[in-house]
């Protein structure tokens, strides 16, 4: 194992050593069977339960430190663990263990004119670096998804969750190693120094992919500085468009849920678009205001309720991650689609309508990773999509898009079988 004291002199040496250990562990993972990997994840889930008191004690330290630092309520909610949330993390590991192993899947097969037998076979990406903030559950989710798909993981959690992340990893390691997983298959950087992040981003040839999960400044830094391929989304500026043909009760329920259920998650609605022909707009904004949400609106939105404050131009491009919402009144589908195209971050956008043609047009024309009809944008989650868990939401157009789970953590290779063919 890497001598972690090397960091004091050279963060690049530390990261390189951890990466080499991780790559060696990944080669061992590649030889493990589907059943062995599943058993290891179930053992890790049980270890989380066995160490609940230790993990919650560590999390209490992080919560206290976060309160002293003045973290917002939304950020503290992301950070907080309790018995129910920890059981959810353990259950997610078991869920991932029950999913089909993607490694070895034959994506396609054919015979070339030369008689060569061609197959494209799914394989692990290798060593994946995950850089994340606030949410300690990412430690377990990332470990589970990487291991199930045959990848090793090098984790760098945020300083907000430093005690929680270490306690979770210690429990995971105990369970995984009992079932034969090498200890270096999941590693956590032993320092919060930003220089170590820079070293990860430069580790081309050692780390195969970087996945950032956090605020805009983190993701921008990763995308700007990385010499390693990056799978990421920058913002979660999610829209809900209440169409003229929306059912009022449904529209109110979905708008309140999309914003206020958990305002600090990336799938939370940040802009509400109300059709000028929808007759119950005042009802919806009133429910949001009464629920404790600050509304910032255009002039027509402000006319709906005197409590709505004026929106600035920047509001339409802001991911609040808090109980704050931008509201605009739009003139029909064309106007709504134009607003979404101009301001959406490509994460998740939704329409509420009883008009099937309007719903299909929205699905067809909104170019986001996730497009919804008559559902809360807070469903933008790998677990809710039946993927077991997610390592992040990807909003780019290459490799993977939307919730990234097992399949998104694989690539493929061509396997070619011949009978003695030599090319002319």
Image (cartoon, rainbow, N blue to C red):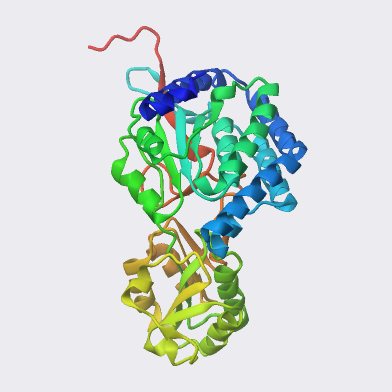
Which residue is depicted at the point 57% across and 64% down?
73
Q: Height in image: 226 above or below 127?
A: below
Q: Is residue 396 visible?
A: no
Whole-percent x, y for residue 8 in the image: 42, 28
Q: Nearer the viewer, residue 395 or 132?
A: 132
Q: Which residue lies most toward the top here?
A: 420
The image shows residue 413 at horizontal and vertical percentages of 41, 25
In the image: residue 361, left or right of residue 91: left
- Of residues 23 and 62, the one nearer the viewer is 62
Name the spot of residue 23 as percent of width and height, x first: 46, 22
Question: Can residue 415 be seen by looking at this rendering?
Answer: yes
Quarter that holds the C terminus? top left
Residue under the image location 33 percent in, 22 percent down: 113
View extreme (left): residue: 424
221, 399: nearer the viewer: 221
Q: Is residue 283 left or right of residue 86?
A: left
Q: Is residue 177 above or below residue 423?
A: below
Question: Which of 127/18 is in front?
Answer: 18
């Amino acid at each position: 194992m890497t001598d972690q004291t090397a960091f004091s002199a050279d963060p690049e040496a530390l990261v390189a050593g951890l990466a080499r250990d991780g790559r060696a562990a990944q080669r061992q993972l590649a030889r493990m069977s589907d059943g062995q990997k599943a058993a290891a994840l179930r053992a890790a889930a049980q270890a989380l339960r066995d160490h609940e008191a230790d993990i919650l004690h560590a999390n209490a330290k992080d919560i206290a430190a976060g309160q002293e630092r003045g973290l917002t309520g939304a950020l503290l909610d992301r950070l907080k663990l309790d018995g129910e949330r920890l059981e959810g993390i353990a259950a997610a590991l078991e869920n991932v263990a029950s999913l089909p192993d993607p490694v070895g899947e034959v994506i396609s097969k054919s015979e070339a004119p030369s008689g060569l037998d061609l197959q494209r076979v799914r394989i692990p990406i290798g060593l994946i670096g995950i850089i994340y903030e606030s949410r300690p559950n990412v430690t377990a989710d990332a470990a589970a998804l990487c291991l199930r798909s045959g990848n090793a993981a090098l984790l760098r959690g945020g300083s907000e969750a430093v005690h929680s992340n270490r306690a979770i990893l210690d429990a995971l390691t105990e369970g995984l190693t009992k079932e034969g997983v090498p200890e270096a298959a999941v590693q956590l950087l032993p320092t919060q120094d930003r220089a170590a992040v820079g070293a990860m981003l430069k580790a081309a040839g050692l780390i195969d992919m970087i996945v950032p999960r956090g605020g805009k400044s983190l993701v921008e830094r990763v995308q700007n500085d990385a010499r390693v391929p990056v799978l990421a989304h920058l913002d979660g500026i999610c829209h809900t468009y209440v169409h003229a043909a929306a059912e009022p009760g449904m529209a109110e329920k979905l708008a309140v849920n999309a914003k206020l259920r958990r305002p600090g998650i990336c799938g939370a609605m940040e802009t509400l678009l109300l059709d000028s022909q929808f007759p119950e707009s005042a009802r919806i904004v009133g429910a949001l205001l009464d629920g404790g949400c600050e509304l910032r609106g255009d002039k027509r939105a402000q006319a709906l309720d005197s409590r709505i404050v004026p929106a600035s131009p920047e509001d339409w491009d802001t991911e609040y991650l808090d109980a704050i919402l931008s509201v605009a009144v739009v003139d029909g589908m064309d106007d709504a689609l134009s607003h979404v195209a101009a301001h959406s971050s490509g994460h998740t956008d939704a329409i509420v309508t009883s008009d099937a043609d309007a719903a299909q047009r929205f699905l067809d024309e909104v170019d986001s990773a996730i497009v919804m009809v008559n559902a809360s944008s807070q469903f933008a989650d790998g677990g809710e999509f039946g993927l077991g868990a997610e390592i992040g939401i990807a909003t780019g157009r290459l490799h993977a898009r939307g919730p990234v789970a097992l399949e998104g953590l694989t690539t493929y290779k061509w396997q070619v079988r011949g009978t003695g063919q030599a090319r002319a």
